[in-house]
Amino acid sequence: MAAKFNVYTGEPAGGSVPAAARLGLEPPRFCADCGRRMIVQVRPDGWSATCSRHGALDSKDLDMKR
Ligand SMILES: [Zn+2]
């Protein structure tokens, strides 16, 4: 699935991703589908980010490599 927007900067996809974000330490702040600013909540064990149109994204949902 290709993101249309950079979830860390809100710019069109293709920009650079911060190193901390690549490591999964930084929560996304913008929706990849629409570029809206998301409501981000950081927890001790991860984060959740909610787009008012596309719903919530949770770090647990992305953690499929284990
Ligand atoms: Zn969205």
Image (cartoon, rainbow, N blue to C red):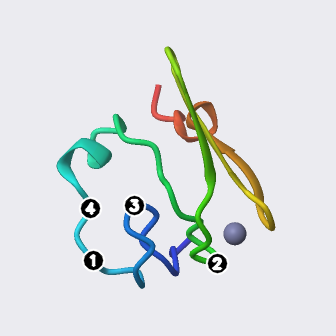
Q: Amino acid at mark 4?
A: Val
Classify 10 Å Cα crowding around label 3: few (below 14), some (14-19), many (20 and above): many
Mark closest to the chain's N terminus, 1 or 3: 3
| Distance (Cα) linking label 1 and label 4 | 7 Å
Task: Give the residue at mark 2.
Answer: 34
Q: Amino acid at mark 3?
A: Tyr
Q: Regarding mark 2 in the picture, which secondary structure is present there?
A: loop
Q: Regarding mark 4 in the picture, which secondary structure is present there?
A: loop
Mark closest to the chain's N terminus, 3 or 2: 3
Task: Give the residue at mark 3.
Answer: 8
Q: Are marks 1 and 4 in contact (CB under 8 Å)?
A: yes
In-image side of 37 versus 29 (left or right): right
Res 15 label: 1
Task: Give the residue at mark 4.
Answer: 17
Q: Are marks 3 and 4 in contact (CB under 8 Å)?
A: yes
Q: Regarding mark 1 in the picture, which secondary structure is present there?
A: loop
Which of discs 3 and 4 lies nearer the camera? The answer is 3
Seen as rendered, the residue at the extreme bottom is 12
Location of residue 40 with respect to 37 vertically, above or below: above
Q: Amino acid at mark 1?
A: Gly
| Distance (Cα) linking label 1 and label 3 | 9 Å
Residue at the image point whose x is 45% and y is 73% from the top: 10
In-image side of 10 versus 42 (left or right): left
